[in-house]
Amino acid sequence: MLHDFLAATSPLNSFFERIQFHWGADDMHSSYSQTLLGSLNFWGLLEGTHLLSLMLFFGTIAVVDSRLLGWTFRQTPVSVVSDRLLPWTVAAMIIAMVSGPILFFSKPAEYYHNFWFRAKLFFLIVAIANVYIFHKLVQKNQSEWDTAESPPFKAKLSGAISLMSWVLIMGFGRMIAYNFLDCGKPHAVWINWVAECKTSPLGSLTPAEYAKQLADQKAADDAAAAAAAAAPPATDPKAAAAPAGAAKTEAK
Amino acid sequence: MYLAQIGKMLPGAPDQIFGHIDGVKEWVDGLKNTDLGKFTNNNFAQIEIFHFIGMFLIGSYVILTGMRMMGLGIKEESIAVVDKNTRWFLHIGALLAIGTGLMMGVGNSGKLYSSEIFTSKMIAMVAGLTFSYFVMVPVAKRDGVATTGNRIGGAIGVALLILALTIFAVRATANVGFFHMIWAAALILLVTLQGKMRNLYLIALLVLVIAWQVMTHVVIPVENEKYMLVNRVFMYLSGLLVFGLSLLNIFGTAAAPGSNNFSRLIAYATIIAWVTVGAAGRWIGLS
């Protein structure tokens, strides 16, 4: 209920639509968002930079997490691995955190209702919360297990959550480019709920609603076909044209 | 103009290289209709994610071991220890990236067959695999000591990498993506250059980037016919700055202690080779 209330009252929909379609737009120019999306080279460079920064980010965080899980560098203290690698992870993260929002800016109204984008943000929050918990709780007594080949369960759990979160964040990030879970297509209720499709310009559609739409359409087509079959066959082309024209006018 | 002439001399898209062989085009066109092609196209998004994870894992090995070979990173451990602990990333990454890459190739055979960037990517991949398996791993195992075989492997890898980079730089559809390699090398330099040299380099790079932005956004707008030319001139200028300083860094000036020339060269080249593979892959998607 709270979700529905927030979705219905959220000013973000119109805010993102204003940004995507109107901000910077006039009779001569597209909006800034559309200019970015249609840019000759900048978009490609930005997306590639985002991806390559993730390569550095994942390349280093995966090793730190693997050490926490006791999979690698078992003879090396955890603090050495993290102290040496985390500055690079942070540098890559900064590049990704700059390029990511600019990528979002190119289609904010669409991305806002993108299922994968929301899933990505959810796991980003999980990953950040995990970092916070790791620093506050797990690292408290790190000196006791810093040199242990196999760190304690809580450190392993933190490493596993981190690794899983980042894999999912990257996977979901890539899925944003694919449209098979976009609003307006028939999806399970929970997918429509997560993406807040109800308030999106494309609306929400469940498989049951879609089936009903198809059935209604088929019934309408069948009725039209039956009416056409029941109508007396026209012998004079002029006479045949007249009722069709009249029907058209009525429909209008 | 000269570059365009060089471009014409280099290998182009696979259809230009293999087009004269009877039956190749039909075979390539038919690949997407095979069971594997259909499976790939039905599950492309998921397969692509595994491809990326594979590339990231390769990145993990080459960045960590490469940086250690340049005297940076986990300096508390020897190069051999860093290599031993991260080599499984390389093996899993290579298996994933090549396996899923083959699947994606089968599903997208028609597009790749006429893509010049694909040629660059494949050459860069062979360079990356040569560097990683025939040079970096054996040299790292011996803590930075290279044999004649490793040096020959390194020379072959460098030749392949130069070929891949040149194709990437001169082909009209791809040369903007060349910035990725320049910036990757620029970032490596930012980490590897030591002392005053790093500050000077940072200033030079900033001046170049600001001048470039002013030229392409204020002086010559995107509508101007000279826009791409100016963009390209700055690409080559920044490329030359980074390449020149990389050579200086590799061969002794302001390098981190505890590394040798050959190790630094291989580390640089291996990272750039895999960045080229990744960037080219992305530009295939964008072209």
Image (cartoon, coloured by chain):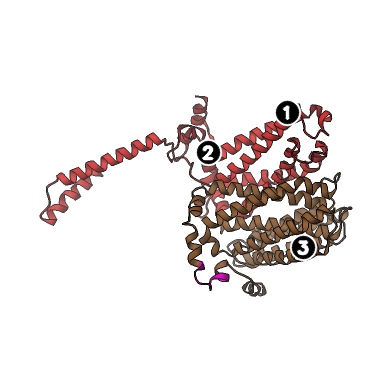
Asked if A18 appears above or below B206 in the picture, the reply is: above
**Chain that bears disc 2:** A
Q: Secondary structure at mark 2?
A: helix
In the picture of the structure, the residue carrying the numbered disc 1 is A154
Asked if A105 appears above or below A158 in the picture, the reply is: below
Residue extending furthest right? B257
Alpha carbon of mark 3 to alpha carbon of mark 1: how far? 46 Å
- Numbered badge on residue A115: 2
Which residue sits at x=58%, y=46%?
A174
In the picture of the structure, the residue carrying the numbered disc 3 is B243
Does the magenta segment cover residue B22?
yes
Image position of B56 (left or right of A34): right
Which lettered chain is shown in red?
A
User: Disc 2 marks which amino acid?
Assistant: Phe
In front: B218, or B271?
Answer: B271
Asked if B248 appears above or below A79 in the picture, the reply is: below
Does the magenta segment cover residue A81?
no
Q: Are marks 2 and 1 on the same chain?
A: yes
Magenta stretch, residue numbers: B16-24
Q: Secondary structure at mark 1?
A: helix
In the rendering, at what x and y percent does residue B194 appear?
A: 86, 53
Q: Are marks 2 and 1 in contact (CB under 8 Å)?
A: no
In the rendering, at what x and y percent does residue A226 appear?
A: 19, 43
Location of residue A238 (image quadrant)? bottom left
Which residue sits at x=59%, y=64%?
B173
Image position of A26 (left or right of B146): left
Chain B: its colour in the image is brown
Alpha carbon of mark 2 to alpha carbon of mark 1: how far? 31 Å
Alpha carbon of mark 2 to alpha carbon of mark 3: how far? 43 Å
Instruction: Answer whether residue A167 is visible to the viewer in this image.
Output: yes
User: Disc 3 marks which amino acid?
Assistant: Phe
Is the residue marked by circle 3 packed among few (<14), some (14-19), or many (20+) residues within 10 Å?
A: some
